[in-house]
Image (spheres, helix red, strand yellow):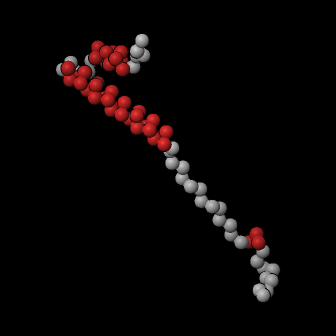
């Protein structure tokens, strides 16, 4: 049997809190992020195609047309 040592009390013992697990995005979040990234790449390709058809010049008029095509809500 171990002898009682009054110099070591339970509050003197180190307590390590359990490490928290890293939270990874769920399946739905990953699917939505992939869909959003694909849509962004598609929009960038269409904008590049439009600029190529207008002589690769980014003018005020081309900026307005891009905003009209991609930022307005279809009705």
User: In the rendered view, would you say 63 is above or below 24?
Assistant: above
Horizontal arrangement in the rendering, residue 51 relative to residue 26 (left or right): left
The C terminus sits in image quarter? top left
**Number of numbered discs present?**
0
**For residue 37, what is the image quadrant?**
top left
Find residue 70 and report its horizontal and vertical position in percent. 36, 20
Find residue 2 and report its horizontal and vertical position in percent. 77, 86
**For residue 17, what is the image quadrant?**
bottom right
Q: Is residue 6 visible?
A: yes
Q: Could you say which is closer to the camera, residue 51 or residue 61? A: 51
Find residue 14 and report its horizontal and vertical position in percent. 68, 69
Image point 36% across, 15% down: which residue? 68
The N terminus sits in image quarter? bottom right
**For residue 16, what is the image quadrant?**
bottom right
Image point 36% across, 34% down: which residue? 38
Image point 76% across, 77% down: which residue? 8
Q: Residue furthest left?
A: 55
Q: Could you say which is closer to the camera, residue 6 or residue 50? A: 50
Q: Is residue 56 visible?
A: no
User: In the rendered view, would you say 6 is above or below 20?
Assistant: below
Find residue 21 and report its horizontal and vertical position in percent. 56, 55
Image point 40% across, 38% down: which residue? 34
Horizontal arrangement in the rendering, residue 21 relative to residue 35 (left or right): right
User: In the rendered view, would you say 31 is above or below 19?
Assistant: above
């Amino acid at each position: 049997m171990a002898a009682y040592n009054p110099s070591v009390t339970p509050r003197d013992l180190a307590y390590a809190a359990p490490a928290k697990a890293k939270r990874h995005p769920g399946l739905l979040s990953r699917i939505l992020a992939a869909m959003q990234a694909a849509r962004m790449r598609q929009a960038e390709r269409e904008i590049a195609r439009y600029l190529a058809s207008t002589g690769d010049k980014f003018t005020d008029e081309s900026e307005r047309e891009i905003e009209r095509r991609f930022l307005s809500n279809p009705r």
